Image (tube, rainbow, N blue to C red):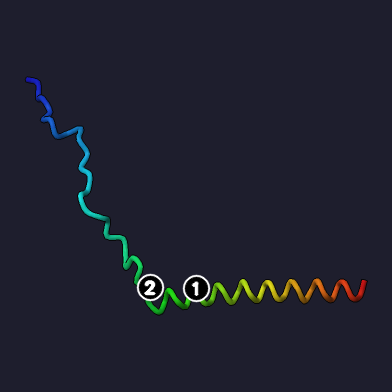
């Protein structure tokens, strides 16, 4: 006896609405702190690099 698969076995279902992946554009206080901390770290690295460059230029 052979079992024939139905037509629906090879079809994928495409979602009709958007995916629920999170808050979207609404950023809470945690997100703001991550961005603020990252910006402060980049600024501190830039200032530190300029200070090190200036010290090297005056001594050399």
How many discs mark residues in the rendered view? 2
Q: Residue drawn at (9%, 21%), measured in percent from left and top?
A: 2
Query: Which quadrant holds residue 56?
Result: bottom right
Where residue 28 appears, as percent x and y from the top left, is: 37, 76
For residue 35, which numbered disc appears in the image?
Answer: 1
47 relative position to 14: left or right: right
Quick check: 56 left or right of 21? right
In the image, residue 58 above or below residue 14? below
Q: Residue furthest left?
A: 1
Q: At x 75% / y 73%, what residue is drawn?
A: 50
Q: Secondary structure at mark 1?
A: helix
Disc 2 + disc 1, Cβ < 8 Å: yes
Q: Say which residue appears at 40% left-offset and 79% top-offset.
A: 29
Quadrant assignment for the N terminus: top left
In the structure shown, which secondary structural element does the residue marked by tag 2 occupy?
loop
Q: Position of residue 52 (x, y in %)?
A: 79, 74
Q: Earlier in the sequence, mark 2 or mark 1?
A: 2
Quadrant where the C terminus is found in the figure: bottom right
Q: CA distance from mark 2 to mark 1?
A: 10 Å
The residue under the point 80% across, 71% down is 53
Residue 18 falls left or right of residue 30: left
Outermost residue on the top side: it is 1
Q: Around disc 2, counting alpha carbons within 10 Å, would you say few (fewer than 14), some (14 to 19), or many (20 or more)?
A: few
Using a 10 Å C-alpha cutoff, classify the residue at mark 1 as few (fewer than 14 neighbours), some (14 to 19) or many (20 or more): few
Q: Position of residue 49 (x, y in %)?
A: 74, 71
> Is 19 situated left or right of 58 in this image?
left
Please tell me whether residue 15 is drawn above or below residue 39 in the rendered image. above
Tell me the quarter of the picture where residue 22 sits.
bottom left
Give the label on residue 27, or none: 2
């Amino acid at each position: 006896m052979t079992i024939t698969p139905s037509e629906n076995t090879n079809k994928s279902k495409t979602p009709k609405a958007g995916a629920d992946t999170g808050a979207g554009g609404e950023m809470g206080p945690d997100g703001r702190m991550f961005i603020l901390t990252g910006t402060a770290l980049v600024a501190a690295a830039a200032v530190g690099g300029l200070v090190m460059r200036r010290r090297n230029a005056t001594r050399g």
